Amino acid sequence: MIDSGHLDRAGRLVTLRPVDDDNWRAVADVAPHDDQRRFVAALGARYLLLSTRSEVWTSLAVYADETVVGHVMWGADDDGSHWIGGMLIDAAEQNRGVGRATVQTLATWLGAKDGEPPVRLSYHPDNTPAASLYTSLGFRPTGAMDDEEVIAEQAP
């Protein structure tokens, strides 16, 4: 379990846990608001499949106290950087600070790995809520793009 002590606005502890036999169905069923589907997968199941079929990504279940409320992935790049990807917070759990606590928790954990690697993520430039969240957490655009997404790195 990855626990940095971050709480959502309801005071629930947000932790990141491995996807396992007990929680994979709940993670697979996580779904965003309909209007977010142009930026993220329609269900957590797609990200779970991606991490199962790829050697790059590792899926984590997002918990608020003892309830699965989302999905997030992390991966390491050839250049030594570590990435946050595939974050999906269930529509019923949004606007409660869960996404913020998730990014804070994972970025802290990734940045503390051996060598203190840079932590990066990407987002579609039209996804202004994501851009605002990531900017408020110290992520700055690098000037590079990945497909149609802005690459941002957390400032040291």
Image (cartoon, rainbow, N blue to C red):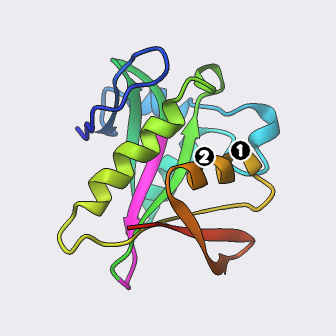
For residue 1, side relative to residue 68 (left or right): left
| Residue highlighted by disc 2 | 133
**Residue that extends furthest to the bottom in the rendered view of this protein:** 79
Binning the other alpha carbons within 10 Å of mark 1 as few (below 14), some (14 to 19) or many (20 upward) gives few
Percent x, y for residue 44?
56, 40
Which stretch did the figure color magenta?
71-79
Position of 12 relative to 29 (above/below): above
* Residue 16, percent from left and from top: 33, 38
Q: In the rendering, which numbered label is found on residue 94?
A: none
Q: Which residue is mark 1?
A: 129
Report the quarter where the C terminus lies: bottom left
Q: Amino acid at mark 1?
A: Pro
- Any part of residue 56 in sight: no
- Disc 1 element: helix
Pinpoint residue 40: horizontal percent, then vertical percent: 68, 49
**Residue type pointed to by label 2:** Leu
